[in-house]
Each structure stands twice: as structure tokens, then as C-alpha cells.
Amino acid sequence: DIQMTQSPSSLSASVGDRVTITCRASQSISTYLMWYQQKTGKAPKLLIYAASSLQSGVPSRFSGSGSETDFSLTISSLQPEDFATYFCQQSNNIPWTFGQGTKVEIK
Amino acid sequence: QVQLQESGPGLVKPSQTLSLICTVTGASISSGGYNWSWIRQHPGKGPEWIGCIYYSGRTYYNPALKSRIIISVDTSKNQFSLKLNSVTAADTAVYYCARVAGGGYLNWFDPWGQGTRVTVSS
């Protein structure tokens, strides 16, 4: 199985901060990488697909980059509604696998 | 607007079979173009993909669970279902159904159902 490792596991930030979360795959996955946001008690919501394509309706402050094994999700200016847990997911190989999550908390 | 809704027992006894149904509204499973998936999430962990099914009945399973799961589709009811047998406490999780979009090697989950919590306990 392809292991997806996110860092950090959690971070504290303030409204307006620029935040970057990284995701590393245990082997090359081209750009078959997605990012999701999950709020407490809710289902994950797709933010980014194909490493850098913004899902319709997602604010442009979210952006994704990377290829092969190293990827990042950036929130350019953190908003109150962005405090949540973020997961990456690969679909290069079955089983499709997720990272363990990065929790973004209020400083 | 496509919506998915999970249903099924919230409590299952050890060694028994967990059975869940996902009802799809706003889209027809039989129209093709998408796979339909089950995903679970243990408390405080990342989601775990269980498997998915196409309207034709073609399935893809997580090898770690393959020996215990069956995913099936009922196009007449616009539903797909999950059966997980021989459950243990390790199968206690929130179970989600989701549509799989994309194609080829690029596959993502959108939208998701709200999730249903299943506890395995005697």
C-alpha cells in the first residue's frame, strides 16, 4: 500500500495567516493527489483534485502543488471557517489511501 | 444536486455481519460514469477506503478487507450496499458512502454522505 504522511499533525495559526500543510507519498503517485477538509462531526469535503485543481465552489485562498512524492496545500489567508482537519488522498494505486490528517487550530 | 444517505444498524454484535445501504438522490446510478464507494473512519484517524462498485456490478475492494466484504448495487432503488462479515471491535467506525469522480488513475470522492456511526459490541 502507498503510505501518505502528512506534516505537521497539528498547527496553531491566527486568522489572516498563510498556512502550508505537506503530504509525502511512500512512492511516486504522479499528480493523483487530492485534498479534503473535514470539520468536527461532518464528512470530508473535496478541496483540490489532481494535486492543484480547485474544486468548484472552493475559495481561491486554497491552492495545491506538487508531484511525484511531495505535495502541499496552502491557505493564503486563514479564515475562521478554515479551522478544521485536512487530509490528503492518493488514487495512483489500489487501495486508495489517505493521510492521517493535519488539524488546524486557532492560536 | 447529488446527495447520498447511509442507513443501517448502529450496533452490531461481534462475529456478525454489518450491513449498510447508501441511497443516492439527484443522480441515477445506472446512468454510468461514476463508481460508488464505501469509506470508513476510525476515531481520530484518516479515512480508510473500503471499496467501490460501478453500476454494472464491477467492484474494486481494499485487499485488507476483501475477504470479508461484499459491495452490491440495486439500480432499481438507486442504492448500493455494504456487507462486512465477521466483525470485531476494530470495525467500530463511522462509515461513509461517496461518489467516485474522475477516471483512470485519477479518482476522488465527491460528494460524501453524512456518515453513520457503527459500534461493534455485545
Image (cartoon, rainbow, N blue to C red):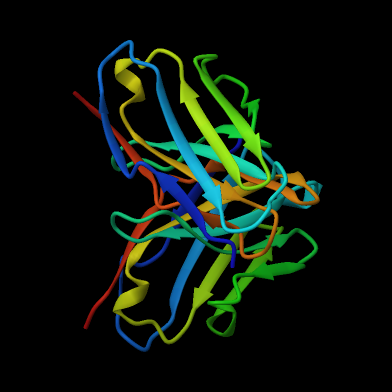
Task: Please state, as top left, top right, bottom left or bottom right, where the N terminus of chain B lies in the image.
Answer: top right
Q: Residue furthest left?
A: A107
Quarter where residue A63 is shown: top right
- Whether residue B82 is visible here, answered yes or no, is yes
**Residue B89: where, in percent of width, then height?**
29, 78
- Quarter the C terminus of chain B occupies: bottom left
Residue at the image point whose x is 25% and y is 17% from the top: A14
Is residue B1 in view from this perspective?
Answer: no
Is B9 on the left-hand or right-hand side of B51? Answer: left
Give the x, y percent position of residue A8: 35, 41
Name the foreground residue: A28 vs B32.
Answer: A28
Vertical comparison of B37 with B13: above or below: above
On screen, residue B89 versus residue B21, left or right, reads left
Q: Position of residue B112 (x, y in %)?
A: 51, 44
Q: Is residue A80 above or below residue A42?
A: above
**Residue B36 occupies which quadrant of the picture?**
bottom right
Total marks shown come to 0
Q: Nearer the viewer, residue A99 or B29?
A: A99
Residue B53 at x, y percent in the picture: 69, 62
Q: Is residue B122 above or below residue A5?
A: below
- Residue at image location 29% in from the left, 58% down from the top: B43
Residue at the spot 41% in from the left edge and 64% down from the top edge:
B8
